[in-house]
Image (spheres, rainbow, N blue to C red):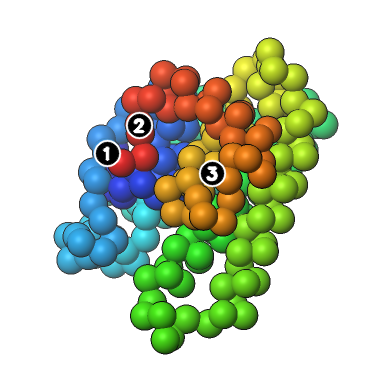
């Protein structure tokens, strides 16, 4: 299988880390949706990262859906089985994905010519980004330092939250700082020390 996309995308990176943790073999093809648009389009006309090309040629998109498929291949899940822990994981993953989404929107707005930027839209997106980080920071303050977010083992919540913070520091560090969200940033520092994170840096 081939995973298409750059690891500087949080969606590609959470997918790649998840595949690695599940033990699902894949080849990473680091194509950019910008610089390699034509090559990417030849694989997937949608030019959406991540794209997974299965061994039989079937093409899947969206990080959550690709991870879901990978779990069927691995015959195990990165989600907790306990209903309460599962709900906690869903909440944290949702907050992490909103953090990524708003950081991406902030980044793309800054790529527009300054005269074309929408100040009210920027303010709204930045506020949503800060609010998502604040909710995660509050949730992580209660997380025990000797456990992971939903128990003794790393789950999708740990992957998504760790990847989300690292991405904010690449594209929106001027909006969210470790000083303002110490629990969130501290957790990500811990997650980034995991071998599967270190094997797939956001470059």
Element type at mark 2: loop
In the rendered image, residue 152, in percent from the top left (x then y), is placed at 68, 15
The reply to whether dot 2 and dot 1 touch (C-beta < 8 Å) is: yes
In the rendered image, residue 80, in percent from the top left (x then y), is placed at 69, 27
Mark drawn on residue 136:
none
Earlier in the chain: of badge 2 and badge 1, it is: 1
In the rendered image, residue 96, in percent from the top left (x then y), is placed at 61, 46
Q: Which residue is mark 1?
A: 28
* Between 55 and 41, the one nearer to me in the picture: 41
Which residue occupies 36% across, 47% down?
8
Quadrant of the rendering where the N terminus is positioned? top left
Which residue occupies 55% across, 23% down?
190
User: Disc 2 to disc 3, how far (Cα)?
Assistant: 14 Å
Q: Is residue 62 visible?
A: no
Mark drawn on residue 164:
3
Q: Which residue is mark 2?
A: 200
Which residue occupies 56% across, 80% down?
119
* Between 87 and 52, the one nearer to me in the picture: 87
Residue farthest to the right? 84
Q: Is residue 142 left or right of residue 169?
A: right
Q: Is residue 98 left or right of residue 163?
A: right
Mark 2, Cα crowd under 10 Å, few <14 / some 14-19 / many 20+, is some
Res. 83 image quadrant: top right
Element type at mark 1: strand
* Between 56 and 38, the one nearer to me in the picture: 38
The reply to whether dot 1 and dot 3 touch (C-beta < 8 Å) is: no
Q: Is residue 125 visible?
A: yes
User: Disc 2 to disc 1, how far (Cα)?
Assistant: 10 Å
């Amino acid at each position: 299988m081939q995973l298409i996309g750059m690891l500087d995308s949080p969606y590609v990176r959470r997918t790649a880390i998840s595949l690695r943790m599940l033990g699902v073999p894949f080849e990473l093809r680091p194509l950019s949706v910008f610089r390699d648009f034509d090559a990417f389009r030849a694989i997937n006309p949608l030019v959406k990262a991540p794209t997974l090309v299965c061994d039989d040629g079937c093409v899947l998109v969206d990080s959550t859906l690709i991870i879901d498929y990978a779990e069927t291949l691995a015959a195990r899940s990165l989600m907790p089985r306990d209903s309460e822990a599962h709900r906690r994981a869903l909440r944290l993953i949702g907050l992490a994905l909103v953090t990524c989404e708003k950081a991406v929107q902030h980044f793309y707005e800054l790529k527009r010519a300054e005269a074309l930027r929408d100040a009210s839209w920027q303010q709204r997106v930045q506020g949503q980004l800060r609010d998502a980080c604040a909710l995660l920071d509050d949730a992580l303050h209660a997380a025990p330092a000797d456990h992971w977010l939903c128990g003794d083992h790393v789950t999708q919540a740990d992957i998504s939250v760790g990847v989300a913070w690292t991405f904010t520091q690449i594209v929106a560090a001027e909006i969210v700082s470790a000083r303002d969200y110490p629990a969130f940033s501290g957790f990500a520092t811990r997650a980034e020390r995991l071998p599967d994170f270190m094997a797939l840096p956001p470059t």
